Image (cartoon, helix red, strand yellow):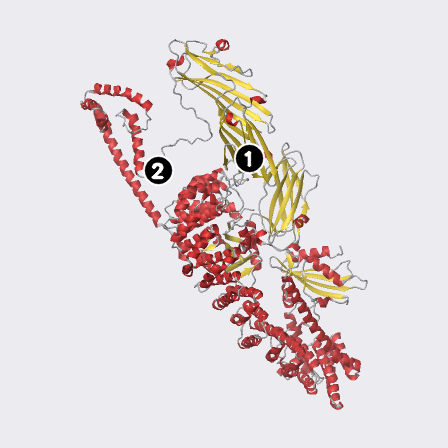
Amino acid sequence: MVVLAASIISKSGKAIVSRQFVDMSRIRIEGYLAAFPKLVGTGKQHTYVETENVRYVYQPIESLYLLLVTNKQSNILEDLETLRLLSKLVPEYSYTLDEEGIGNTAFEILFAFDEVISLGHRENVTVAQVKQYCEMESHEEKLHKLVLQSKINETKDVMKRKASEIDKSKIEKNRGEKGGFMSLQSMGSGRIDTGFGSDTSISSNSGGFGSGSVFGLSTDLEPQSSNSKGRPPASASAPPKGLGMKLGKMQRTNQFLESLKAEGEVIVEDVRPSIGQSKPVAPPPSDPVTLTVEEKLNVTLKQDGGLGSFDLQGTLSLQILNQDDGLIQVQVETGGNPGILFKTHPNVNKELFSGENILGLKDPNRPFPTGDGVSLLKWRMQSADESFVPLSINCWPSVSGNETYVNLEYEVPPMFDLQNVVISIPVLALREPPRVQQIDGEWRYDSRKSILEWTIVLIDNSNRSGSMEFVIPAVDTSELFPISVCFTSTSTFSDLKVVNVLPLKGGNPPKYSQRTLLSTENYQVV
Amino acid sequence: MEKSCSLLVHFDKGASALANEIKEALESNDVPAKIEAMKKAIMLLLNGETLPQLFITIVRYVLPCDDHTVQKLLLFYLEIIEKTDVKGRVLPEMILICQNLRNNLQHPNEYIRGVTLRFLCRLNEVEIFEPLIPSILSNLEHRHPYVRRNAILAIMSIYKLPQGEQHLVDAPETIEKVLMSEQDPSAKRNAFLMLFNCAQDRAINYLLTNVDRVSDWGELLQMVVLELIRKVCRTNKAEKGKYIKIIISLLNAPSTAVIYECAGTLVSLSSAPTAIRAAANTYCQLLMSQSDNNVKLIVLDRLNELKTSHRDIMVDMIMDVLRALSSPNLDIQRKALDIVLELITPRNVNEVVLILKKEVMKTQGGDLEKGVEYRQMLIQAIHSCAIKFPEVASTVVHLLMDFLGDSNVASAMDVIVFVREIIETSAKLRVSIVSRLLDTFYQIRAARVFSCALWIIGEYCLSLSETESGIATIQQCLGDLPFFSISEENEVTDDSKKKSQQASSITVSSKRPAILADGTYATQSAASETVFSPPTVVQGSLSTRNLRSLLLTGDFFLGAVVACTLTKLILRLEEVQSSKIEVNRASSKTLLIMVSMLQLGQSSVLPHPIDNDSYDRISLCIKLLCNTDDGIREIWLKSCHESFVKMLSDKQWHEMLEIKAKTQISHSQPDDLIDFYHLKSRKGMSIVEIEDEVQDDLKRATGEFVKDTNDTNKLNRILQLTGFSDPVYAEAYVTVHQYDIVLDVTVMNRTKETLQNLCLELATMGDLKLVERPQNYTLAPESSKQIKANIKVSSTETGVIFGNIVYETSNVLERNVIVLNDIHIDIMDYISPAVCSEAAFRTMWAEFEWENKVAVNTAIQDEKEFLDHIITSTNMKCLAAPSALEGKCGFLAANLYAKSVFGEDALVNVSIEKQADGKLGGYIRIRSKTQGIALSLGDKITLKQKGSS
């Protein structure tokens, strides 16, 4: 009971319009259509032709054929009904029933065909209904448009009103500048009364007494700024007290959002970016002095176990919040790793560092700059020694039949504890996610990138080694590489530690915090 | 699997637009211009362009447009663009359209929603519709049924996708709920269809809970119900008891389509006589009630199927089938008669013949256009009835003999041949048939009928009275002697002038040489073949003088037959007549007739004189009558009859053989494999699908289902395209499907360099067309690649595919070309042996314009062997009866016939003669409607006829 295609073809078998309702290749449908005119006999009083595979039910329209291609089990009565309907529809859309006319209105005819047959099944429709469906006149859409239009008009009205209000207020402001402090009062509007204590309202009520009210404002500013540190700025629970334009504006956007919400708009306020790769984002520094030791690893491991390359880059950076705390020196302690060479910033006193492991500026009177981190020290390590590798991976793919079994094993030497380990194995685009048979940790399959990710949150003494096994359809085993790994760790190769921060001007050493992070930049098994 | 193609629009290359023109139009704000541009873009895409740069333009300028037509065209555009990359991953930019689709699904206009949902039915990419699923689901509750029904279909097609059920886990449940509450018949059907396809248990459940209401459901839904029942019962035969009741209730449905489907379902479910009878009854009702010829024909096909499987039940339906004869359509009548003829039993034969007789009478009365042909069909039908059941012959033979004088030679011929056979097989009818034949003899009009009738008279007039009246009848028909005299010469000359004019006018009208049944060109006068017009111009102008007038037109072959018949009768008369005087008198009269015929033949009044053959035969008869001896008498009176009996028995024997062969074919061989459905595995198909014949049928139609062909066959067709030492080695295997050829080309890089932009360029000669443009590939060192090329075939003709491989190496920026071996596509793949009647062969032979004449030039010495060789090498069917080809007489003529898959006919006539030096000589003529077949077949034969290899 399936119509394969509805077509209009010329007597020579050229398809002018054809709509297929089931999946079939182009060559196939063209073949069927081209063969048709040869199969039609002349002088026959019936209008169907059967071949080995299909049945054609047709109807001549002037010099063309309108035809349905169906399978042989199809219900002839239904097909004839469909054909009859289609033959009534074609002249509705095409004024001249010749090749050109049909060609010009091909798409309209296709639209109509679509309404009559869906997925090969006949729909119970009449010519009038098809016409209605194709015209797409929708009452609801009109209604919707009307509503939209009225909303627009309404908003325009509101806009006009607001504009005139603003104009009015401008005029009043101008007037106020001439006549004392009137404007401020009008700007503050009613909220001043509620937010302020009674005494400020008195002061503002005192009208012409300009300086007094200014003073009041400036005294208010102190606690406000101290407050704002602890409190998130978005909290609208305590309406900020008439503090000039800046905060007022914030208020207004908030109000806008609120009103939008009330009108039913969905507004996502929490637009925090989702944490993708498990890269810890350092919380903003809260201590006056922050020292960060960061090491980045570029490692290439060979598939068969050897070390391709090992490259470590480290930095020590200093971040100072306050200018006042800039005059300091930093005393560090290195782990004494012989493979590491340190390089100091050109402005740093080299002798001091090589002698006493103290980092200070050449000019002791100059403070360290504030703001973003300044790197004081850089180091590099390259090695061919496999024992340095913090995480080694063993991958054993084996093909059996039309499947590949992949066994993966990781090993971490005792000196490192690794966090957020993600091992990404490229598998070819698969229709189904790989079958994971055994795993230490978790896995997920990213179908878009065709990557299988093996995640282990923490590797410490409890799980120095682990393994995973999964099955995928047979692939060339080289396709499974490069496997890339990323992880973080708090122990570093240099073992650099900040021992102390020494103020140059004497006094208490400023509070400092220290962060140490080893992360991978490019860690691959190829 | 090839990419599927969902729409075709004819594209006129002359009106092609440039991509940037389209782009400009799309960017404009003018809606009609946009529509035009979209149409052009779609047509370009369908034509094989890729237009990648257009996508972004469309996303930017067309997506936001809110014109409905633009939106619908946009959906077409999205339907046909390539949405995945080479590896099958969805292109990232496709995500851009998701938002638009989502908006469309929430559009206030229900039709926009509907068409968008319908578009989603054709979408295969999970990534695109994934974000849309909530919107689709929400559309299930839309107010308008148009939206709902399309939403259901969209859900169904998503659910059916490989990973679809993961995205729509509870879809069956949802749809079931929808089905419960749905009122719109179309949406209800779709919902049921969805359950049927995706959660059959639920569909069955719903059906069984609503059994009582099935007959009130809409037509569309009922159809799906029937489909479901069929499917369920196929997989689970035990269940069918539950459903038979439903089917029976649906047999009374108001919609004929449902009734038809019911009957089909019944037949497929059960072989119980009641069920079959009900189905057959239903079909017969449809046959009566439907006026559409197509329906009648297909219903007759169904009945025919029933006939082969359940003959005993169909026998009872024979009268109902016969009623279809009332239709004026010849095809219907023919099919009905075919069915009826095979259902005749001794019990019903009388009734059937009665009706057939009535029908024959009807054809006499009305001057129907097709009456003649129909009558012929009826006569043949009666003929075969009478042969099967000789007892009815007596009732029909006299009726049929009325048609001896029929103006249609063919039906008259049928009748006389029939009479000839009956008179031999049923001896007791002989007397009555002979007297009847002598009575109607004068009505006969055609020469061939005359010859046959004369032969019957000569052979079966046994008694004295019969013999005498036989001689008298013939003499009467010949009229007064002599045929012309000197005194009458002037008059006769006038007459014969008129005659000759007429004769020549007839010969002009049929200019083409006639072909004899064995395929040789006829040498007899063409005039005698044609129907003779009423003989008003001949002297006496009596209608009793047909025979005479035929002779006067110069048909001396007939004259010879008359002479032989008379001789035979005289010889018999000698046996049965005691009075010698009577015999002598008759004998002398006869001699006079023969002599007059010879005289006529040698006179100058006729345009052409008597031919030697007839002359010899007539003079032989004269000699015989003057000088009889027993040996000759024996030959004339006995051997002749014996050989006829032998011919009849031979014919019957052959028919028997054919029937036996037929019955043997239907049985399976003892060592045949038995397929266990459940153990059968086919790649990528679930068991249910394998069992579903409807699905198979559909798959075959869409070309998805490839028959498991023998792999060794495949290997036989491998063609080497380049040399082993070429930088690129290529070989192909050619698969010839019905209307297309697929080349699977394996390309191998034999160098140590990477080959870039490697391209397989093909070109064709003949009626072949490349479907796709060639693509460029990069081939790593020593690696290989499979390239597929599709070629469309549009007529039967030998074609050649040739081409080359073009590539660039990395360091030299020049194109290298390797020319490929030619691939010859053989015409033999497209023709298959077929059978057609002799008459049809002759009409086609006369009609077809292209003839290719190939002179025989072969090493084969034996005629038969040569013919067999030609038959096997051309894949044709020999139409000549095997007995006609037996024996060594030094010459052979046969017709061969074949049909191409495109329905074209190929005719071949072989006429060969053994020459004095032992070699074969002669011609093979090929005729066809188109030049291609004639030429290609001719080439093939020229190539193959040398033979023996």
| Image quarter hosting the C terminus of chain B | bottom right
Q: Label 2 sits on what residue type?
A: Val
Q: Position of residue A28 (x, y in %)?
A: 56, 51
Q: Which chain hosts label 2?
A: A
CA separation in Å, label 1 and label 2? 45 Å
* Picture disc at residue A224: none
Q: Is residue B606 left or right of residue B95?
A: right
Work out whether disc 1 and disc 2 sit on a shared chain.
yes
For the point 58% across and 65% down, the residue is B308
Residue at disc 2, secondary structure: loop
In this view, which residue lies farthest toward the right?
B917
Q: Position of residue B564 (x, y in %)?
A: 73, 79
Asked whether A495 or A259 is in front, the reply is: A495
Report the residue marked by disc 1.
Answer: A469
User: Around disc 2, counting alpha carbons within 10 Å, would you say few (fewer than 14), some (14 to 19), or many (20 or more)?
Assistant: few
Q: Quadrant of residue B486?
A: bottom right
Q: Position of residue A384 (x, y in %)?
A: 59, 21
Instruction: Decide if residue B447 is in sight here.
Output: yes
Q: Is residue B407 left or right of residue B571?
A: left
Q: Quadrant of residue B534?
A: bottom right
Asked whether B53 or A20 is in front, the reply is: A20
Instruction: Decide if residue B36 is in sight here.
Output: no
Report the residue marked by disc 2.
Answer: A266
Between marks 1 and 2 in the image, the one whose residue lies nearer the viewer: 1
Q: Of label 1 and label 2, which has the lower sequence position?
A: 2
Asked whether B157 or B229 is in front, the reply is: B229
Is B778 rendered above or below residue B585? above
Q: Which chain hosts label 1?
A: A
Q: Label 1 sits on what residue type?
A: Glu
